[in-house]
Image (cartoon, helix red, strand yellow):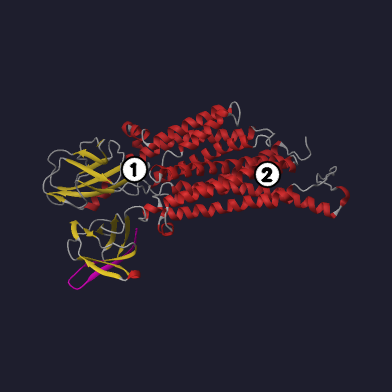
Amino acid sequence: MHPLSPSPLTSRAHGLAALVRLAGAGVLACLVMVVLATPASAHAVLEGGSVFDGQVLDTPPEELFLDFNEAVVSPRGGLRIFGSDGERVDEGGTFQTDDAPDIVRVALQPDLADGTYAVTYRVTSADGHPVNGAFVFSVGAESGSGDQLLGQVFSSGADRPWAVLAAIVRWVTYAGVLLAAGAVATVAWMREQLDGDDQPVTRVVRRAGVAVLVTAVLGVLLQNVLVGGDGLASLVDASGLQSTITSFVGISAIVRAVGSVLLLVGLRRALSGPVALAGGVVMLTSLLLEGHTLTTGPAAVVWGASAVHVATAALWFGGLVVMAMELRRRRRSDDPVGAGRLVARFSSLFTLSVVAVVLAGAALSWAEVRALRALTSTGYGWALIAKLVAVLPLLALGTWNNRKLIPALTARRRRSARGGSGQPVIAGGSDEVADRAAARDAAWATLTKTVRIEALVVVLVLAATSVLVALQPAAEAAGITGAFSTNQEFEGLGQLSITVDPNRAGANEIHIYLLSEVGRPLDIDEGVTMTLSQPELDIGPLVRTPTLSGRGHFVLQGPELSVPGRWEITTEVATSRFDVASTVTEITVNP
C-alpha cells in the first residue's frame, strides 16, 4: 500500500463526512425553500367572465365561464360552483373549446335557487404554473356571508404544504440533472487527466440518475395535486392525471425520465460513453420544456440563453463534484502534478463557461427584468439578486484556485524516506525546502476545501433557482412588458388593488378595486375620484371621476397617461359627508 494511502475505514469516514456536509447543505437549501416557497405566481390572470365577484343576478345562469389573459389548461374539475350549503351546483366536466383556449366553462344545475354561490377555479398557465382563486356571486339576493362560504369551500393556504414539497422536488430534480449530466460531460472532457478508478464517480452519477427518475414521477403527481385542489384524492383522478401528463409539465417529466433511463443504461458500459452523454443531454433539454422559457420573449434569445445557462450550471455542479472526488484521490496518492494538470484542464472549461454564463445571464436578465426598478420591487427580482450574490463567490473561488493555489501546489519538492511517525522528512533539512513543503501541504488542504465549498454554494444556488422558476418574471410583475398591477393598504377602508392596462403612453384603462381587509369587494358605488400627476414634468393634477363597473370596482378610460415616466395616482373615497380616505400609488408608464 502506498505510504499515503488511507485505510478503508479512513476512506469511509472521509466519504461519510463529505456526505454529511452535502446533506447539511441540502437541508439548508430545503429550509430556504420552505421559507420562500408559495403557490406559484404565474402569468395567467383572471380577466373576467359571465359573472364577477359580488355580482347579484336577476335570473339564474345556465352556464358559467371565466376568461383569462392567456391560454390555460383546466382539469375536468377545474371550475366548481358551490351553494350556500357547501354542496356543488355545477354539472361537472369543465370544458374548453379549441377556438377559445383562454376561456373555461362549466354547466350549472337548472333553476338555481336564490342565494349566494361560491366559484372556485384551478387551471394551469401556459408556463406550467398552477393558478387558483375564488369569488362569490348571488342570484336574486345575497344569503349569508360570502366570506364564510369561501372559507368553507376554498382555503388559499391549503396549497402551501404541497407547494413547499413541489419546490423541494424541483430542487432535487435540478440537483440530480445537473450533477449527472455535468459529471458525465466533465469526465469526457478530462478523460486523459482522469486515469484512475471512475467507479466512485459512477456510483454518484447513478444515484443522481435514479433521483431524477423518481422526481419525474413525483413532479407529475404533485402538479396534479396543485391543479386538482383535492389533496391526496387528486392522485387517483385519472382525467386530471391525463391532463397533467399531456401538459408541458408532463412532457418535460417524460423527457427527463427517458433521459435518466438512457443515462442509467449507458453507465453499464462507460461513464462518459455516447449513451450516457446522450442521456445527460436529454435530461438537460427537459428543463427547457417548462417554465418561463415558454412564455418569455424574444423566443430565440430566451431559448438560446437558457440552453447555455443550463449547460453551464451542469458543468459547474457536476464538474465540481468530480473535481472534489478526484482531488481527494490525488492528495492521498501524493500526486500534485496530476492534480495540477487536472485543475488546469478544468480551469480552461471553467473560463469558457464564465464567459458563456455572463452572456447568457445578461440576455435572460434583459428578457425577464428589463429595468432596474423591477429588481427591487418584485419577488422575482429579489430572488434573482440572491442567486447572483451566491454565484459571485463561485467565480472568485475559481479564479483564486487557478491563480494562487495551483502554483503553490505544483511547486517542486523533493521527498525522502518517511520517519517512524509517518510524517514526511524533507531532504537536506533546509528551512526553505521545509517552508515550501508546508506551503504546498497547506495549498492541498485549502484547494480541497474551496472545491467543496464551491459545490455546496451551487446547492444553495439551485435552491434559489427552484424558487425563482415559480415566480412571475420581474418585467411582467412590475408592469414593464405589460399591464401594471399592484395591491396596497388603504387606510380607513382596507385594501386597494389597481391595474393599468396596457401601461403604455397613450390611452389606458385604469381599474381600481376597493377591498376589505380580507379581500372582499366593498359596497361602495359613488364618491370616488382619481387624481393623476407627473411631478417631474409638472403635469397635473388631472382630476377624474371613474365609472362604476361592479361592486367596489371602478374604471377610468382615457389618454391621461399620455407621457411615459413616473406618475402618481391618488385615489380618494368619501367615507362620510366630511371624511375622505385617500392613498397614493406610484407607477412607471412605459413608452
Does residue 496 appear left or right of residue 548 in this picture?
right
Q: Residue at x 47, y 42 (%)?
A: 304
Instruction: Return the residue at label 2.
Output: 344
Please tell me whether residue 401 belongs to the stretch shown in magenta: no
Give the image quarter of residue 20. Answer: top right
> Mark 1 = which residue?
125
Q: Is residue 450 visible?
A: yes
Q: Earlier in the sequence, mark 2 or mark 1?
A: 1
Q: Position of residue 252 (x, y in %)?
A: 43, 36
For the point 80% across and 54% down, the residue is 435
Identify the residue shown where x is 77% and y is 52%. 438
* Image-quadrant location for residue 541: bottom left
Q: Does the magenta-highlighted stretch encompass residue 586?
A: yes
Name the residue type under label 2: Ala
Q: How many marks?
A: 2
Residues at badges 2 and 1 in contact (C-beta under 8 Å)?
Answer: no
Q: Quadrant of the C terminus?
A: bottom left
In-front residue for pair 217/74: 74
Question: In the rendered structure, which amino acid carries the disc numbered 1?
Answer: Ser
Q: Which residues are magenta?
A: 571-591
Which one is in front in this view, the residue at disc 2 or the one at disc 1? 2
User: Which element is circle 1 on?
Assistant: loop
Q: Position of residue 425 (x, y in %)?
A: 84, 47
In this rendered view, identify the residue nearer to me: 275 or 147. Answer: 275
* Residue placed most toward the observer, 458 or 521: 458
